[in-house]
Image: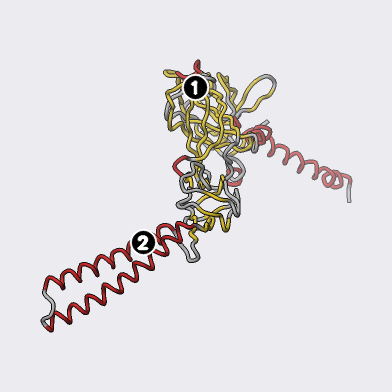
Amino acid sequence: MNKNNLLIILLLPLFASCGKQVAVQEKAADGLMLTDSLQQVISIDTVRETALNNELLLNGRVTFDAGQVAHVYPIFGGTIAQVNVEIGDYIRKGDVLAVIRSSEVADFEKQQKDAEHQLALANRNLEATRDMLDSGTASERDLLQAEQEAANAKAEVKRLREVYDIYQINANSTYNIVSPVSGFVVEKNISKNMLIRSDQGEELFTVSGLDNVWVMADVYEGDIRKVNEGADVRITTLAYGKDKEFTGTIDKVYNILDDESKTMKVRIKLNNKDYMLKPGMFTNVYVQCRVEGELMPRIPAHALIFEGGKQYVVCVGADGYLRMQEVDVYKQTDKYCYLNTGLKEGDRVVNKNALLVYNALK
């Protein structure tokens, strides 16, 4: 092999390497294209002109939804024979909470036996009167009177049976305390062998559903004008931190100031399907207070990138190519950024994994 051929063979890898470098440079010059695979790891949001919101921080507390709370009182006085539930237990409507032995129930048992006896006598008297009417020894008036006595006795037996059903009366002079709603036992004021009266003011049990809860927040007098019904709120708790937010709206404003704290209460109803919110939890309530007349482009806070003292976003062009865009931020909250310049309504920006795309573009 001569020297010229040997030189060509040695230079071939170098030529190939130079060709790849040129191709890479040309691809980089074209920019980064939004492909199907890239869309699987990022998310894109559209810029909207939105009324500027200021957040007002309120202190709040989770409470029961009053519409789901049931207080259970005794029907008759007596002695607690059995207690079936403890605080925190989940129960269904109609479940037996406790069994009470009562002398008043014993009176009902006697009344029922007397009523059944009177019904049997009235029925026998009616049959006898009919036979006497057929033989001519009784009149129509006697028959009507016997029928009325039988009807009255039957009505009394029916009434007492309904009383038994309503009051959950059992045998052995006992009756059941049952739950009127499904929910959790949140208060219990009885124990076995305890004596109770039918006229006592304290409830035996309090049962409440937790599928929905209220958050009651305090508004200081100087902030009352900033809060109104329908305002959007986001709520955080000490238990879950800022990683878990609950969102809702103010559905009621209590237009009365507390004499001691000089605050006004507002209420937010929240769905609590997973029972994450527990009554008694302290909350931070961030109320969105709209500034009338000011509209600004708004983007998600996660879309913003800081570098070198400047702020950027990654935009998606109409041609599908990605580019870096410097923006001027007017106001930033935990959730959104309001912009002075850099974007307009309808522009699209990368939200999820924006920093990774930004570094790839660099």
Disc 2 packing (10 Å; few <14; some 14–19; many ≥20): few
Q: Quadrant of the C terminus?
A: top right
Disc 1 packing (10 Å; few <14; some 14–19; many ≥20): few
* Count of residue discs: 2
Residue 69: percent from the left, percent from the top?
A: 48, 44
Q: Residue furthest bottom?
A: 135
Residue 329: percent from the left, percent from the top?
A: 57, 20
Location of residue 68 with respect to 321 vertically, above or below:
below
- Residue 258 badge: 1
- Determine the CA span between mark 1 and mark 2: 47 Å
Left or right of 318 in this view: 311: right
Q: Residue at x 56, y 24 (%)?
A: 57
Q: Secondary structure at mark 1?
A: loop
- Residue 99 badge: none
Q: Residue at x 68, y 33 (%)?
A: 359
- Name the foreground residue: 102 vs 279: 102
Q: Can you identify the residue that label 2 sits on?
A: 162
Location of residue 30 with respect to 49 vertically, above or below:
below
Whichever of callouts 1 and 2 sits on the residue coming sooner in the sequence is: 2
- Name the foreground residue: 25 vs 221: 221
Q: Residue at x 17, y 79 (%)?
A: 130
